[in-house]
Image: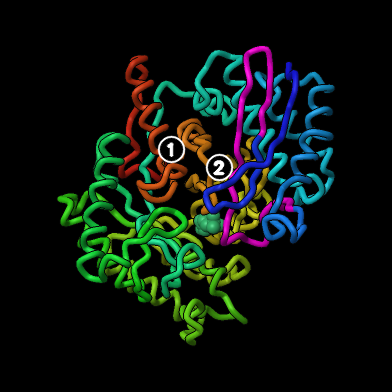
């Protein structure tokens, strides 16, 4: 049983306050830290912030901490629920205590911190690694684990950097590697080559990093970014073995019914949804792109549906779906995409995120696990990815501690499986359907 739950205010990778939860059982104290997005969608669960302008520009989370200490903690301890077997019930109790649809009363940040810490406590009580415990929670206990393809965001734009680039993320995906360890190495080598290419082309001032650890050189057209990636992959010697994913995060430049690619420079470069779709089709034809996320805004269902009809790549819904099972079901019904981005803090509990992922799987979709642009050193999503066998995840560049900690944890898991003589594979080209 749980003995105590304590919240604290700590910092995330952008220097903004976030929630830390310490949950104590007879097996020890288990900690979780909560991430936070910048290009947030309207359908996400609510991150509770103080709004008191005298501290952290209003971004403090002391009320959410209070909700952990005075409401969630005492009620869960009193319930006697056991994280070893009752994670779903603990999450349900918190949802009930909050009482709103979007967790706006107690805060999705407060609730998620408790949920993640409870999962860690549950794994420890059962004497198992977190990934194995989460495999049980997602009923994907299997003889063979699948290590994910790491999609690393090595060029940052959109709301994550100060360059003129409208598209938010350009990711490299080593589908031709044979293990997560080799995949991480190839990506890191490509990243190092990208750095010298950017330095030679744009000068030393251009090698500064965006929020997710990728470079943010002064480029604006997506083709400039993709050309840089293609050159870096070739220079690193991984031609044909590393593919590309793009997340334009187009909600951030959706203005009055169309898409303004000049939104960061106050220029007008406005495209209709159809024009934007043809731009994507041109890029898909010219470059080795295998994944496209949020090509259209969170309410532009028609554009998604049209695009999905002739889309040959993985089409991921992020702001569109918000890891919310009811939006996933709507999207399945409309046939709006073929993959769900999974961000635990979009929905606010671990078991609801898993349930949304299972709904996606049941429609034949893929699930793509994601960090947030505001991150912490918590490596929970690495275990979640392996536990759910999603076959791929994104956690930013191979740089900055809060990004790298997830990739390092994945290599720990791979080592752990090898030492235990447990069977595992690397998702590689099968990354969309590794769960089958
Ligand atoms: P965010 O961006 O964490 O800033 O919302 C991530 C994404 O759009 O995938
Ligand atoms: Zn996204």
Instruction: Tell me if the residue at label 2 has its CB under 8 Å from ligand 2.
Output: no
Residue 360 vs residue 267, the one in the foreground: 267
Picture quarter containing residue 251? Answer: bottom right
- Left or right: 114, with 130 as reference point: right
Whether the magenta-drawn stretch holds residue 46 is answered as yes
Residue 211: x %, y % from top left: 47, 57
Secondary structure state at the residue bearing disc 2: helix
Is residue 35 among the parts visible in the rendering?
yes
Q: Looking at the image, is mark 2 or mark 1 earlier in the sequence?
A: 2
- Give how far apart the Cα atoms at labels 2 and 1 are: 31 Å
- Left or right: 56, with 105 as reference point: left
As drawn, 159 above or below 92: below
The residue drawn where x is 55% and y is 42% is 362
As drawn, 424 above or below 372: above
Residue receiving disc 2: 362
Picture quarter containing residue 210? Answer: bottom left
Residue receiving disc 1: 405
Q: Tell me the magenta residue range.
A: 21-49
The residue drawn where x is 29% and y is 45% is 175
């Amino acid at each position: 049983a749980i003995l105590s739950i304590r919240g604290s205010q700590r910092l995330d990778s952008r220097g903004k306050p976030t929630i830390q939860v310490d949950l104590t059982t007879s097996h020890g104290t288990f900690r979780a830290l909560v991430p936070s997005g910048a290009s947030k969608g309207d359908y996400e669960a609510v991150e509770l912030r103080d709004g008191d302008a005298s501290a952290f520009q209003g971004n403090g989370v002391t009320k959410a901490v209070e909700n952990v200490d005075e409401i969630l903690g005492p009620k869960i301890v009193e319930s006697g629920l056991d994280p070893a077997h009752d994670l779903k019930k603990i999450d349900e109790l918190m949802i009930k205590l909050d009482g709103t649809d979007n967790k706006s009363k107690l805060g999705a940040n407060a609730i998620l911190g408790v949920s993640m810490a409870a999962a860690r406590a549950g794994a420890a009580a059962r004497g198992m690694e977190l990934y194995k415990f989460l495999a049980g929670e997602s009923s994907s206990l299997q003889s063979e684990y699948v290590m994910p393809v790491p999609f690393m965001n090595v060029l940052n734009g959109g709301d994550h950097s100060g360059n003129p680039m409208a598209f938010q993320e350009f990711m490299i995906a080593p589908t031709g590697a044979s293990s997560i360890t080799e995949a991480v190495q190839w990506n890191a080598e490509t990243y190092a080559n990208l750095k010298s290419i950017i330095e030679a082309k744009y000068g030393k001032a251009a090698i500064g990093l965006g929020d997710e650890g990728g470079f943010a050189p002064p480029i604006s057209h997506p083709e400039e970014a993709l050309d840089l990636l293609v050159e870096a992959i070739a220079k690193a010697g991984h031609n044909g073995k590393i593919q590309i994913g793009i997340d334009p995060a187009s909600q951030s430049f959706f203005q009055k019914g169309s898409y303004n690619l000049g939104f960061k420079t106050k220029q007008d470069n406005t495209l209709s949804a159809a024009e934007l779709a043809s731009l994507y089709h041109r890029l898909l034809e010219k470059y080795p792109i295998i994944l496209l996320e949020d090509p259209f805004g969170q309410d532009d269902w028609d554009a998604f549906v049209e695009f999905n009809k002739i889309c040959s790549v993985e089409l991921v819904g992020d702001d569109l779906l918000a890891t919310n099972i009811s939006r996933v079901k709507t999207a399945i019904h409309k046939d709006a995409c073929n993959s769900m981005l999974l961000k635990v803090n979009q929905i606010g509990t671990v078991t609801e995120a898993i349930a949304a992922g299972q709904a996606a799987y049941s429609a034949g979709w893929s699930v793509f696990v994601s960090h947030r642009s505001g991150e912490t050193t918590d490596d929970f999503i690495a275990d979640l990815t392996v536990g759910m066998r999603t076959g791929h995840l994104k956690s930013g560049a191979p740089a900055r501690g809060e990004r790298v900690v997830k990739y390092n944890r994945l290599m720990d898991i791979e080592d752990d499986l090898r030492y235990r003589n447990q069977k595992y594979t690397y998702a590689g080209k099968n990354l969309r359907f590794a769960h089958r």
